[in-house]
Image (tube, rainbow, N blue to C red):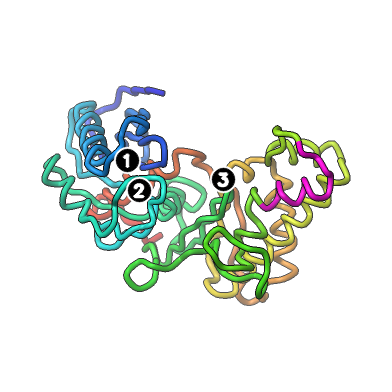
Amino acid sequence: MNRRINTMPATYAIGIDVGGSSLKCGVVTHTGEIVQDFLKPLDGARTEQEVIDLIAEAIRQCAGAVDGNVAGAGIGFPGIVDDNRVIGGADNLPGFEGLPLGEILKKQTGFDIVIDNDANMMGLGELVFGSGKGCSDIVFLTVGTGIGGAVVINGELYGGYKNRGAELGHMMLQHNGAPCTCGAKGCFEAYASVTALVNNYRQISKDTGRGVNGRYIVEQYRLHNAAAIRAMHRHFDYMAAGIAGLVNIFSPQKVVIGGGISEAGSFYIGEIERRVRNTAMPAALAHTTIAAAMLGNQAGLLGCTAKALKDHLIIDTRG
C-alpha cells in the first residue's frame, strides 16, 4: 500500500502505528488529509534495536515525502506507555520493557516524539478526524479478537494514574465468569469480543469449519440462520451491558464502536443502542449517542498524527 496526494504546503505530522507484524506509517496534514502512507513489515526485525531502527527509518522516510513544516511524530504502541516510555505489555515485540523510546527516537531522527498506547491513539483519531469530531467527551471501543478502547474527557485522553488504566475490555461483567486472556475471569472481552461471538456460535451450531469468523456469522444472521441469530443477540446483550456501565460512569457525548464488526451495517449499532437505552441510567444517557467508527484501519495512524499536532498546539481537541 503506497499512496501519494499532491497538496499545498501545510503543517504536517508523522504517524507510526506499531503492530505485531508491521508499522503503519504516514504523513498527515493538520486537517487530517493523508499525504502519504505505507506499511513497513516487521517480520525481519528480531531484536528490540532492529524494531527501533525500523521505526526511525520510517520517520525519516515520511519526513522526506513532504516539503513543509513537520511538527513531529506520534507513535501508537501496544502495551503500557507512560511519559513517552514503554513500560511493557508489547507481547508480540522483543524487549520494550521500561524503555525511553521517545527519547531514543528523538536522538535518532531529530524530531519531537510523542508516544501513547495504540488503542488510545485510535480513540484520539476518531475524536479529531472521525465519528467523535466536534465532541469533547467520548468513549471509544475497538471490538475484534479482544476489546480495547480509550476514554477522552474534556478533549484529553484519560488513562488513569501513570496511564495504567482505561482497560475497557477488562472491566468485570460476571464474577468468576468466563476466563479471559488477561488471566482474570468474567471480563467484558471474554463475553463481547468477536472471539467470544465465534466461540458461542460454534457451540450453538456445532460448526467446526475454518471459515467461521465474525463476517461469516453476520452473513448467516442476515440469512436468518437460527444459530447466528442466537449468537448475535448474545453479543448485542453483552456489548450493551458493558457500554451501559461505561455510560453510567462517564456519560460521554458519544460511544464510538470500531473494529471490523462495527462495519456490519446500521442494524449492528441499532441493536446495541436499543439495549443500552433500556439498561443505562436515563440521566447519564441523556446526552449520549452511539455511533460506528469512521476511520477504519486508519484510525491509529490519524490518532498518532493528531497527538503530535495537539502537543504542538496546532490543533485543539477540547471540542
Q: Nearer the viewer, residue 153 or 14?
A: 14
Judging by the rendered image, the residue that carries numbered circle 2 is 76
Q: Is residue 116 located in the magenta-colored stretch of the structure?
A: no
Q: Please tell me in which quadrant of the rendered image residue 282 appears.
A: bottom right
Q: Is residue 159 above or below residue 294?
A: below
**Amino acid type of disc 2?**
Gly
Q: Please tell me in which quadrant of the rendered image residue 283 appears.
A: bottom right
Split into 4 quadrants, where in the image is the C terminus?
bottom left
* Residue 93 place in picture, x, y as percent: 36, 45
- The tag earlier along the polypeptide, 3 or 1, is 1
Residue at image position (66%, 73%) is 176
Tags 1 and 2 touching, CB below 8 Å: yes
**Amino acid type of disc 3?**
Gly
* Residue 19 place in picture, x, y as percent: 40, 41
Residue at image position (60%, 71%) is 172
Q: Please tell me in which quadrant of the rendered image residue 233 appears.
A: bottom right
Q: CA distance from mark 3 to mark 1?
A: 19 Å
Left or right: 111 in relation to 204 = left
Count of numbered tags: 3
Tell me the SS state at disc 2. strand
Judging by the rendered image, the residue that carries numbered circle 1 is 16
Q: Which residues make up the magenta segment?
A: 196-208
Tell me the SS state at disc 1. strand
- The tag earlier along the polypeptide, 1 or 2, is 1
Tell me the SS state at disc 3. loop
Left or right: 37 in relation to 251 = left
